[in-house]
Image: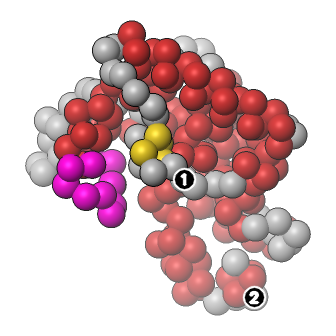
C-alpha cells in the first residue's frame, strides 16, 4: 500500500490480486447477494484508490481494507428499504461452468483434501442456512474469522468494538451454529483440526 501511495500503479494490482477473493467472500456473505457483493467490492477498491493518501500504516492494511468493505456493506444495507437476499443455495448465474450450481459451492475453496471437500459440499448448504440465521454482528465476526482468517484483534478494529466483545460474539455464533446444525441433523463439533467446517 505504501508503494501504491508513492505512485507505483503496479502495487495496486498486487493488492487487488492478493485480497480480492477473501474480501469478496466476506462481502458476499455479509450481503447474501452476488451482484450486490460485486458492486460493493468495486466500491471498496475505488475507496482504497480515493483514500490512498489518507492511509497510514498504524494498523495492518487488511484491517483498513476490511473496515472499508464492512462500512460500505452497512451503508448499502441501510440505504435499501428491503433486502431481497439470494440464498447461497440458489443456482448461480454467470459462466456456464457455474450455471445451475448452488452459489455457495461456486465460491473458491483452495487447499482442501477430497474427503474434506466431499464433507464440506454436503455440509456447506446447511452451514450457510445456519449462518444466515445468526444476528448480523455474530455472522460478521464468524465470517471475518473463519472465512477470511482475520485475527480477533483486527476484527475488533474493523467492527469498532472491544476484542472481548468480538470473542463473545464468536462464541455465541458457534453456539448458535451448533444448535441450528443439530436441528438440521448434523451432529458433532464445528471444528476439525482447529478449523471450523467453513474452511
Q: Is residue 97 magenta?
A: no
Instruction: Of the two numbered discs 1 and 2 on the same chain, state the one appearing first in sequence.
Output: 2
SS of the residue under disc 2? loop
Question: Can you tell which of label 1 and label 2 is closer to the viewer?
Answer: 1
Residues at circles 1 and 2 in contact by the CB criterion of under 8 Å: no
Q: What residue appears at the point 50 percent right and 56 percent down from the top-left corner?
A: 22
Q: Nearer the viewer, residue 15 or 151?
A: 151
Mark-to-mark CA distance, 1 and 2: 28 Å
Q: Which residue is mark 2?
A: 6
Q: What residue appears at the point 50 percent right and 23 percent down from the top-left corner?
A: 177
Q: Work out whether residue 121 can be spotted.
A: yes
Q: Position of residue 124 (x, y in %)?
A: 32, 34
Quarter of the image for residue 103 reads top left
Split into 4 quadrants, where in the image is the N terminus? bottom right
Near mark 1 (Cα within 10 A), the count class, few <14, some 14-19 or many ≥20, is: some
* Boundaries of the magenta span: 106-116
Q: How many marks?
A: 2
From the viewer's perspective, tell me whether residue 128 is left or right of residue 52.
left
Q: What residue appears at the point 66 percent right and 30 percent down from the top-left corner?
A: 171
Quarter of the image for residue 59 reads bottom right
Q: Is residue 113 magenta?
A: yes
Q: Is residue 59 above or below residue 141?
A: below
Q: Which residue is mark 1?
A: 148
Name the disc covering residue 30, or none: none
**SS assignment for the magenta stretch, majority:** loop
Near mark 2 (Cα within 10 A), the count class, few <14, some 14-19 or many ≥20, is: few
Q: Nearer the viewer, residue 25 or 109?
A: 109
Q: What residue appears at the point 23 percent right and 33 percent down from the top-left corner?
A: 122
Q: Work out whether residue 136 can be spotted.
A: no
Q: Is residue 163 above or below residue 9?
A: above
From the viewer's perspective, tell me whether residue 151 is left or right of residue 58.
left
Q: Residue furthest top?
A: 183
Amino acid at each position: 500500500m505504501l508503494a501504491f501511495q508513492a505512485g507505483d500503479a503496479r502495487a495496486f494490482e498486487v493488492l487487488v490480486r492478493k485480497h480480492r477473493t477473501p474480501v469478496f467472500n466476506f462481502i458476499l456473505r455479509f450481503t447474501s447477494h452476488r451482484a450486490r457483493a460485486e458492486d460493493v467490492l468495486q466500491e471498496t477498491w475505488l475507496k482504497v484508490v480515493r483514500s490512498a493518501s489518507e492511509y497510514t500504516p498504524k494498523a495492518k492494511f487488511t484491517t483498513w481494507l476490511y473496515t472499508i468493505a464492512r462500512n460500505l456493506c452497512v451503508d448499502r444495507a441501510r440505504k435499501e428499504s428491503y433486502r431481497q437476499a439470494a440464498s447461497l443455495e440458489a443456482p448461480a448465474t454467470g459462466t456456464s461452468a457455474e450455471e445451475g450450481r448452488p452459489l455457495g459451492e461456486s465460491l473458491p475453496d483452495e487447499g482442501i483434501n477430497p474427503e474434506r471437500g466431499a464433507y464440506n459440499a454436503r455440509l456447506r448448504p446447511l452451514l450457510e442456512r445456519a449462518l444466515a440465521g445468526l444476528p448480523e454482528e455474530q455472522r460478521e465476526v464468524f465470517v471475518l474469522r473463519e472465512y477470511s482468517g482475520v485475527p480477533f484483534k483486527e476484527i475488533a478494529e474493523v467492527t469498532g468494538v472491544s476484542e472481548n466483545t468480538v470473542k463473545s460474539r464468536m462464541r455465541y455464533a458457534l453456539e448458535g451454529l451448533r444448535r441450528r446444525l443439530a436441528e438440521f441433523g448434523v451432529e458433532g463439533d464445528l471444528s476439525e483440526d482447529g478449523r471450523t467446517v467453513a474452511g
